[in-house]
Image (cartoon, grey):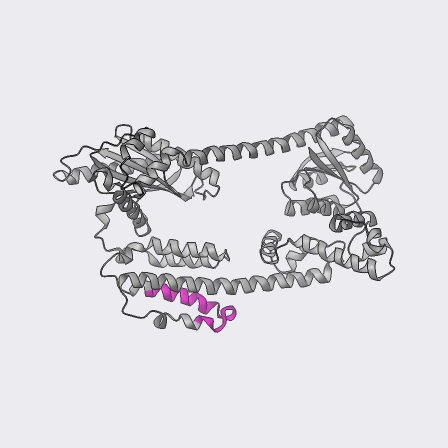
Amino acid sequence: MHTILVVDDEAIVCQGIREFLEKSDLPIEQVLTASNGYEALDYLRMENVDLVLTDIQMDGMNGITLMESILSENPDVPVVVISAHDEFDYAQKCIRLGARDYLIKPVLLSQLIEVVNKELTRRSEKYKLRAEDSLKLRFSMTGVSSLRTYFLNEMISGSLAHADDYRFICEQIDVTLSGPYYSVFVTELQWERAGIDGEAIMLLRDRNLLKYAAVNIIEETLTNWDAISFYSYGNKVVTILQLEWDDYEINKADNISKLNMVGKTIVQNIGQYLNMEAIVGISPIQMGLQALPDSYRKASEATKWHGLYETRSIFFAEDYQSKEASVQVNWQRKTDELLEEIKTGRKLEDIRQVVDGFISQISPVFDQEDTTAGIPLSIAYRAYAVMLEMKETVGERYKALDPIHYFRFPLQTIGMRQRLASFLLECAELIHSSMIDHDRAIVQQTIAYIRAEFRNQELKIQDIADHVYLSPNYLSFLFKRIANETVWEYVTRLRMEEAKHLLLNTSKKRYEIADEVGYESPEHFSRVFKRYYGESPNAVRG
């Protein structure tokens, strides 16, 4: 059942449309009425409205301004205009602001029913699609966590290394692992660069569907091989190749070339059919099921080399165990990207993940026995330079992170990695806290402005955002994150608290109080007040 809001400054029009719609056979739960845009916005902020029917010319906030506010605050709510004006300019502007239809008064009731039914049907279809998407997500998640996938992941992780029922488990999940030689492929799907436009894939549902498709593509690619592909964690798909290459060492170069060709074909096919980049790590060939965990570890580690060799997508583990990573890494750009991520104002938990990911990307640098302090120290100084730029908000705290004092040389490889990770985390926390202080200052400015203006009947969120030089959307996000309530919840709270104070401590009439706290209509003020406090203004006054 749906909720419809009718907005018109002629009470008889509102009443007529409401009664007509309530008597219709349409799936309508309630029809709300408002005499101007300000009342309408209050309803939209308090109720789950499915459709707005609005006039254009109204006292107070007119229909055009109302539509601009709806577009800013509730863009998913459809609007149908009912107006006495048939000028093209009006209709054009309404359509540009997202109006679904433009009806001319007097409206034929059959036409009104047709338009309302069309929009409510569209709304229902939207909900239905969301429900179907939810079911698809559950289905895909069930596939990811199936018994077969679960046991195969346990197998490559080493959890079943000492189990004596390998063969029994394989029979139960209909998998044959006879080897005797195995190579493990780890395919990492690059969510950040996917689709025709190269946009990031953010939704879990979409990622799971792409993983499902990737497994199918890999299986098709390996039709002529004895291989098993399955989902792993995150963005990984794992493939176990079973080989009978007794001559592996004799023809090693040729056999490695074959494995690399398989990896390239996987990457090409995923790119062609899914418009998505992929990275493949390939383990050395080893004998026996007991070697699978080690093969999986080496294949996973091989994919990390993409952080240093971004133009490559195939990484054979043995090829990269002896390479000089420190001279290949493009650490300058990676550090700049890291610092930009830190400065986005994201949650501290997310920033810690970003730092961990950065350290993981350049991890091959620390795997070299002859690692020097050159690159880590340069990275540290780049982060330190950012804090110097922000010293007005960071204060004197940055001085404790002077790299020359922070890093105690000489450091061994493991010590260097841990020390750089700790340094970057401390920098991130300091930058984050200073940005939070800055954001809090903006919210305090917003609160001060609202407290000065909440009595203004024409106050809009755009006005508030303009005062602090932010967009309405970003201010709404920032205010909610720091104040734990929306901008308009705060405005309403101030208005209601002031109204209650006036009711209890003055003899002012209801219409005077309504006007004083920002409501043009006493009736609308009473409805908002009762919804907020659970009782009418008269009941509060006693």
Q: Which residue sits at x=34%, y=39%?
A: 153
* Identity of the residue furthest to the front in this view: 164
> Does 387 appear above or below 477?
below
User: Is residue 273 visible to the viewer in this orientation of the structure?
Assistant: no
Q: Main secondary structure of the magenta part?
A: helix
| Residue 48 as seen in the image, left or right of residue 376 | right
**Residue 239 seen from this side:** yes
- Which of the 4 image quarters holds residue 257? top left
The correct choice, above or below, for 392 with respect to 331 in the image is below
297 vs 326, nearest the viewer: 297
Tell me which segment is drawn in magenta: 377-398
Horizontally, residue 251 falls left or right of residue 384, namely left
Please state which of residues 310 and 347 is positioned toward the viewer in this rendering: 347
Please tell me whether residue 379 belongs to the stretch shown in magenta: yes
Q: Nearer the viewer, residue 195 or 442?
A: 442
Q: Position of residue 512 (x, y in %)?
A: 85, 56
Residue 207 or residue 94, whichever sits in front: 207
Which image quadrant: the C terminus? bottom right
Is residue 538 positioned above or below 79 on the image?
Answer: below
Direction left: furthest residue? 250
Q: Is residue 357 above or below residue 420?
A: above
Residue placed at 44% from the left, 62% from the top? 428
Inspect the magenta stretch and tell me whether residue 258 lies in it: no
- Locate residue 375, reporting x and y percent: 31, 62
Q: Position of residue 321 (x, y in %)?
A: 22, 51
Horizontal side of residue 32 vs 470, given as left or right: right
x then y, percent, for residue 59: 80, 47
